[in-house]
Structure formats: C-alpha cells, structure tokens
Image: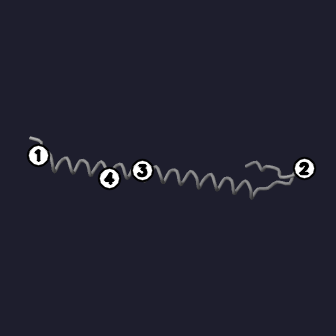
Amino acid sequence: MQYRKINALGIPNPLRDIARSSAALVATAVKHDLLIESGLLKAVLLQEVLVWEMQHAGEDG
C-alpha cells in the first residue's frame, strides 16, 4: 500500500489510509448485507404468493 503524504515534509499517514480502507470495507459489507436481505425478502414474498395461489387454485373455476 502506498501512503499519502499529509504535509510538505512528506510525512506519511498510514492510519488515515487504513481508516479509509476500513470505511470502504464496511460500506461494501453493508451493501452486500442489504442485497442479501433484499433477496431473502423477495424469496419469502414469492413463497407466500405461491402458497396463496396453491391454496386458492380451485376457486377460480
């Protein structure tokens, strides 16, 4: 990893880079979790619709 410089003397700040990397990882993990939860919700809703349709299949004639 290449460190960014924080002043004219060229002092590296690895902690800032680590914090930015950590924040990016957290954001990616949250997005991934939301996508998974969204997919699970869709699966549950689809299952509910299919169950309802099976229960009411003979009612339409």
For mark 4, does the 10 Å Cα neighbourhood hold few (<14), some (14 to 19), or many (20 or more) residues?
few
* Numbered circle sitting on residue 11: none
Q: Is residue 54 left or right of residue 28?
A: left
Q: What amino acid type is highlighted by mark number 4?
A: Val
The residue that mark 3 highlights is 38
The residue that mark 2 highlights is 8
Q: Earlier in the sequence, mark 2 or mark 4?
A: 2
What is the CA distance from the residue labelled 2 to the residue labelled 4? 57 Å
**Residues at marks 3 and 4 touching, judged by CB atoms closer than 8 Å:** no
What is the CA distance from the residue labelled 4 to the residue labelled 1? 24 Å
Q: What amino acid type is highlighted by mark number 1?
A: Glu
* Numbered circle sitting on residue 59: 1
The C terminus - image quarter: top left
What is the CA distance from the residue labelled 1 to the residue labelled 3? 32 Å
Q: Earlier in the sequence, mark 1 or mark 3?
A: 3
Q: What amino acid type is highlighted by mark number 3?
A: Ser
Q: Secondary structure at mark 2?
A: loop
Between label 2 and label 4, give the one nearer the viewer.
4
Residue at 42% x, 50% y: name it.
Answer: 38
For mark 2, does the 10 Å Cα neighbourhood hold few (<14), some (14 to 19), or many (20 or more) residues?
few
Q: Secondary structure at mark 1?
A: helix
Q: Secondary structure at mark 3?
A: helix
Residue 20 at what x, y percent from top left? 68, 53
The residue that mark 4 highlights is 44
Q: Earlier in the sequence, mark 4 or mark 1?
A: 4
